[in-house]
Image (spheres, helix red, strand yellow):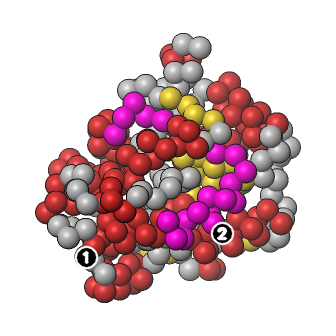
Amino acid sequence: MAPAAHPAPPHGYAAPFVAGVLDDALAHGARILGVSGLQGTGKSTLAAQLVEAAAGRGVRAVALSLDDAYLDRPARQRLARDVHPLLATRGPPGTHDAALACATLDALRAGDAVRLPAFDKLGDRRLPPDQERTVRGVDLVVFEGWCVGTPAEPAAALAEPVNALERDEDPDGTWRRFCNDALAREYPALWRRIDRLLFLQPPGFDIIPAWRWQQEQALQAREPARTGMSRAGVERFVQHYERVSRQALRTLAVRADVVVPLDAERRPVA
């Protein structure tokens, strides 16, 4: 199918593509559909579209993001103090409450009434319980996140830094070992709860900083009062995710049940 048939995020994926993803999940009896994709690939957009498309078929669906399970800022500040300063930045493995995400997915699968965790990214705080949304009787959970399904690296792979951030701010490898150990220890149980995994596969990691900058510009245009990042800030920020992103690119093309290659405009090419 021609790439032009599928508009790129943030405008959303074309309805036939969304319908095809939903068809595949339902045909395989998935209760929890994982949507994995590096920064800027449109996974949150796709998740929202899948929930809307499911509702049109009478399927009760809800989207949950790995981002919703971030550790609260005080917890990350303790990690930054006790382990490594880079752990103040949310996102890399070890900065999520994986047990909370597991418990939430289990309750959703059981059809229980569930308060969905949520995170205020502007305030950098988890929302209090009285602001969480309660759902029950869900048929399908779309669980999306930038590293969903990604396995840890072998310890030997951590020896050499992959970018300037690791070289200059983590010269002894403490931060990257902590993140990799967390990915090996805490996240596999979460990945096992996924019934079917879709990977939005970018052309490579090198395009991710530009895509993340596009996201930042869109956010600043939509929320002028928001304190945004500069282009240089985005470039540095993305380096926090580069190691695990490259591991995702190496492994998810094989591990995922459905792989959707994206072109440079974030359009599915197959």
Q: Amino acid at mark 2?
A: Cys
Please indicate whether residue 195 sits to the left or right of residue 197 in the image: right
Q: Which residue is at 45% across, 47% downward?
A: 248
The magenta stretch spans which residues?
184-205
Label number found at residue 18: none
Q: What is the quadrant of the N terminus in the image?
A: top right
Q: What is the quadrant of the C terminus in the image?
A: top right
Label number found at residue 102: 2
Give the image location of residue 256, x and y in percent: 60, 42
Residue nearest the observer in this picture, 81 or 6 = 81
Q: Which residue is at 47% across, 75% downward?
A: 71
Looking at marks 2 and 1 on the same chain, the residue that comes earlier in the sequence is marked by 1
Q: Quadrant of residue 192?
A: bottom right
Contact, CB < 8 Å: mark 2 with mark 1?
no
> Which residue is disc 1 drawn over?
85
Q: Which residue is at 68% across, 24% downward?
A: 16
Give the image location of residue 202, x and y in percent: 43, 34
Mark 2 and mark 1: span between their CA atoms?
A: 27 Å
